[in-house]
Image: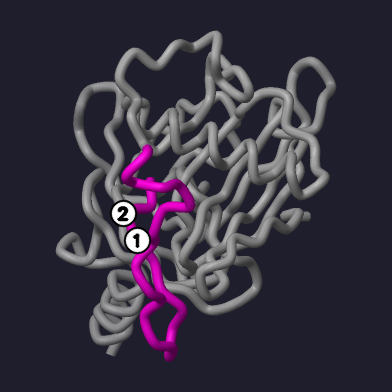
C-alpha cells in the first residue's frame, strides 16, 4: 500500500510540470491574453510607459543556465515590443519570443516582438494604408535637417528607409495640424488591429493614434 501511495504522489508531482514538448524556445510564438499599459520609472526619475501582455495561464518557456544547459520556467507576463495593441480586450498576438529583454524600457524579463495580432472572435481589420500621396512621395535626397521632427537616437521605428522616414514626417504633420505637440519622434509603428499608425513623441511623453476612418485620417491621444 505504501508503494502505491508513493507512486501516486510521484505521478501527481510530475503532472504539475509542463511537458518538454509544450515549452517554447526563443523564436516564433502565438499568445492569447490581454494587454495593459503600465508606468515604468526610469533611472533618471522620469516616467515612461510600457505595454504588458498577460496570458490567462502560464506559458512554459526554455531558458539557458550559465553552463548552457536549458531549464523550463512558467511565465504569464510578456513585454510587448513594437506597436502597442488595444488594452483590456482578448487578443491573439503573433510574433517572436525573446527570453532576454534588453530594451531600454525594460519591464519584465521576457518579451514578444509583435508582427500581427487580432481580436479574438472578431473579423480581421482591413489592411493598413498610408496617409501620404504615393504619386508625390519622392524621398530621393531626403535630408534629415528637413524632417518635420528629429528622430530620437533610441527611437523604435517600423522601418528607417527614406520612404518610411517621409511617412513619419507626414504623421508628425498630421498630429500638429490636429493641434497636438510632437517635437521629436520616439516611436512610429503600424497599428496591429486597425488601419492606421501609432506615433509617440518627446521621449515617450506623448502618444497618438492616427487612424484611417473611411478615407479621413483622424488623430487621437493615446492615454
Q: Is residue 125 magenta?
A: yes
| Residue marked by disc 1 | 116
How many neighbours does mark 1 have within 10 angstroms: few (below 14), some (14-19), or many (20 or more)?
Answer: some
| Residue marked by disc 2 | 95
Q: Secondary structure at mark 2?
A: strand
| C-alpha span from label 2 to label 1 | 7 Å
x then y, percent, for residue 108: 56, 41
Residue 17 vertical position relative to residue 78 in the rendered view, above or below: below
User: Magenta segment, which residues?
Assistant: 113-136
Judge depth for marks 2 and 1 and give the one in front: 1
How many neighbours does mark 2 have within 10 angstroms: few (below 14), some (14-19), or many (20 or more)?
Answer: many
x then y, percent, for residue 50: 64, 44
Residue 32 vertical position relative to residue 137 in the rendered view, above or below: below
Q: Nearer the viewer, residue 53 or 151?
A: 151
Contact flag, marks 2 and 1 (Cβ < 8 Å): yes
Residue 63 vertical position relative to residue 67 in the rendered view, above or below: below
Amino acid at each position: 500500500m505504501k508503494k502505491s501511495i508513493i507512486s501516486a504522489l510521484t505521478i501527481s508531482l510530475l503532472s504539475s510540470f509542463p511537458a518538454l514538448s509544450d515549452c517554447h524556445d526563443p523564436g516564433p510564438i502565438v499568445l492569447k491574453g490581454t494587454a495593459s499599459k503600465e508606468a515604468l520609472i526610469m533611472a533618471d526619475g522620469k516616467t515612461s510607459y510600457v505595454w504588458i501582455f498577460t496570458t490567462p495561464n502560464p506559458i512554459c518557456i526554455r531558458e539557458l543556465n550559465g553552463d548552457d544547459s536549458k531549464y523550463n520556467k512558467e511565465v504569464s507576463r510578456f513585454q510587448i515590443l513594437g506597436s502597442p495593441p488595444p488594452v483590456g480586450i482578448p487578443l491573439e498576438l503573433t510574433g517572436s519570443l525573446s527570453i532576454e529583454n534588453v530594451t531600454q524600457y525594460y519591464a519584465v524579463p521576457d518579451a514578444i516582438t509583435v508582427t500581427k495580432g487580432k481580436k479574438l472572435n472578431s473579423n480581421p481589420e482591413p489592411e493598413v494604408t498610408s496617409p501620404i500621396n504615393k504619386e508625390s512621395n519622392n524621398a530621393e535626397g531626403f535630408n534629415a535637417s528637413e524632417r518635420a521632427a528629429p528622430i530620437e537616437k533610441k527611437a523604435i521605428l517600423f522601418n528607417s528607409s527614406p520612404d518610411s522616414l517621409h511617412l513619419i514626417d507626414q504623421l508628425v504633420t498630421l498630429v500638429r495640424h490636429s493641434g497636438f505637440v510632437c517635437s521629436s519622434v520616439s516611436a512610429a509603428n503600424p497599428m496591429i488591429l486597425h488601419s492606421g499608425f501609432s506615433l509617440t513623441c518627446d521621449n515617450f511623453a506623448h502618444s497618438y493614434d492616427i487612424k484611417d476612418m473611411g478615407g479621413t485620417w483622424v488623430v487621437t491621444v493615446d492615454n
